[in-house]
Image (spheres, rainbow, N blue to C red):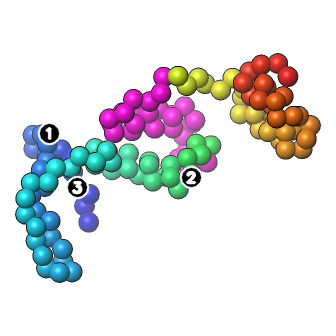
Amino acid sequence: MIPLPTRSPFSGGEIIVTRFYCPDTDVTVEGRFSVSAPFAQLTPEQLQFIEIFVRNEGRISRMEGELSMSYPTIRNRLREIIRAMGYEPGQEEEEPTVAPVDRSRVLQDLDQGKLSFEEAMRILQGEEA
């Protein structure tokens, strides 16, 4: 099956669905149905990205290997999709102040009891331990 387009390939204008057909019951419903769900606004490539995102449980680090893309590239694609769905990504986010390798070491030290929770949080937030 072909995904429902969100824009007319001829004019770029809105598409209004006028017929649904159920082959199991051989019933056809006619009317004017607009496609307004946020996911309906996404391109097939964006939907594929979202599928990969969900399959990887939102873990960008796992997506990096699967997509052969850097963390910043994946974040940018995600932000583009958020905008395409009609939302604005949060402005209040700050980039992590601790490198991923250091972050892993801190979490490992926390897990092994070498750091307290408070010490680990201070390090991860870019403060002195």
Q: From mark 1 to mark 3, how far is it between C-alphas? A: 14 Å
Image quadrant where residue 46 sits: top left
Coordinates of residue 55 in the picture (x, y in percent): 53, 56
Q: Residue furthest right?
A: 114
For disc 1, the marked residue is: 12
Q: Nearer the viewer, mark 2 or mark 1?
A: 2
Regarding mark 1 in the picture, which secondary structure is present there? loop
Give the magenta-colored segment's residue range.
62-91
What residue is rendered at 84% in x and 39% in y?
110
Going from the N terminus, do you reach mark 2 or mark 3 first?
3
Q: Would you say the residues marked 1 and 3 are in contact, meaning their CB atoms lie under 8 Å apart?
A: no
Instruction: Name the mark on residue 63.
Output: none
Instruction: Name the mark on residue 4.
Output: 3
**Residue 82 visible in rendering:** yes
Coordinates of residue 38 in the picture (x, y in percent): 31, 44
Regarding mark 3 in the picture, which secondary structure is present there? loop
Left or right: where 101 falls relative to 82: right
Regarding mark 2 in the picture, which secondary structure is present there? loop
> Which amino acid lies under the numbered mark 2 shown in the image of this protein?
Asn
What residue is rendered at 14% in x and 65% in y?
20
* 10 Å crowding of disc 2: few (<14), some (14-19), many (20+): some
Coordinates of residue 23 in the picture (x, y in percent): 18, 77
Q: From mark 2 to mark 1, how far is it between C-alphas? A: 33 Å
> Which amino acid lies under the numbered mark 3 shown in the image of this protein?
Leu
Left or right: where 102 falls relative to 109: left
Q: Is residue 35 above or below residue 105?
A: below
* 10 Å crowding of disc 1: few (<14), some (14-19), many (20+): few
Image quadrant where residue 84 sits: top left
What residue is rendered at 18% in x and 74% in y?
22
Going from the N terminus, do you reach mark 2 or mark 1 first?
1
